[in-house]
Amino acid sequence: MTPSKGISFRVNWGGVPRLLAWPACEKGSVLYEFAMVVLVLSAMLVGIVYGGITFYDYETLANATAVGARTIAINGKTTTQACYLGEQALLGAATSLNQSQITVSFPGTTTTGTYGAGSLSCTLTEGNTVAIMATYPCDMYFPKLGINLCNDQSTPPTITAQAAVRVE
């Protein structure tokens, strides 16, 4: 039997030993590239998750502020407790937020009494505009990096939502 001329099982490849044709320094390069890419992708993923949580908190606070403003508009001319009712409606609508950290105020409206104590009253007349504003702390703090991604100049950084309605 004569060997086939088309197939060759040579140790050398074009005069170069096969071990030198595939250098050993290429081994592990895929693992190295994966490690570099995973660092960047995981940082992006953490940022997206934290940003989503903060956006959810903002949307919850904005919707709760709208509920509080609607309550003030409905009860504004029938009772002096409209601001208290609006504050309670806002806190009741923001169930997923920490109630003790929400700060409610009424900019441009004269109020008497204490917030949250049931003694808050305001006198509103028909046709006037009343605003309700709520703030909630923003905590996108990364302890390992020592930075807060809530790029707000207030101390501590807060999320703010405001709604204004006309008393009818």
Image (tube, rainbow, N blue to C red):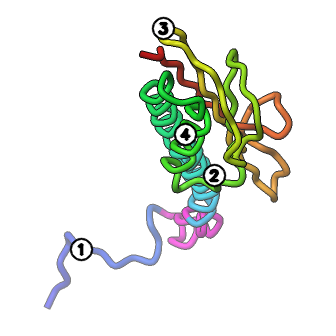
Taking the spot 47% from the left edge, 27% from the top edge, the residue there is: 78
Q: Is mark 3 on a helix, strand or loop?
A: loop
In primary-sequence order, the first of circles 1 and 3 is 1
Report how far apart the C-alphas of labels 4 and 1 lie in the structure: 90 Å
**Front in this rendered view, residue 146 or 104:** 104
Report how far apart the C-alphas of labels 4 and 2 lie in the structure: 43 Å
Question: Is residue 22 covered in magenta?
Answer: yes
The disc labelled 2 sits on which kind of residue?
Answer: Ala
In primary-sequence order, the first of circles 3 and 4 is 4
Q: Which mark is in front, 4 or 1?
A: 4
Question: Quarter holding the N terminus?
Answer: bottom left
Q: Is mark 2 on a helix, strand or loop?
A: helix
Q: Quadrant of residue 158?
A: top right
Tag 4–tag 1 contact (CB < 8 Å): no
In primary-sequence order, the first of circles 2 and 1 is 1
When the figure is inspected, residue 160 is found, relative to residue 140, above or below; the finding is above
For label 1, the crowd category at 10 Å Cα-Cα, with few meaning under 14, some 14 to 19 and many 20 or more, is few
**Front in this rendered view, residue 107 or 27:** 107
Report how far apart the C-alphas of labels 2 and 1 lie in the structure: 51 Å
Q: Quadrant of residue 57?
A: top right
**Front in this rendered view, residue 126 or 58:** 126
Residue 153 placement (x, y as % from top left): 82, 28
Tag 3–tag 4 contact (CB < 8 Å): no
Residue 7, which numbered label?
A: 1
Q: Name the residue under label 2.
A: 43
In primary-sequence order, the first of circles 4 and 1 is 1
When the figure is inspected, residue 1 is found, relative to residue 8, above or below; the finding is below
Question: Is residue 61 covered in magenta?
Answer: no
Q: Name the residue under label 3.
A: 127
Residue 85, which numbered label?
A: 4
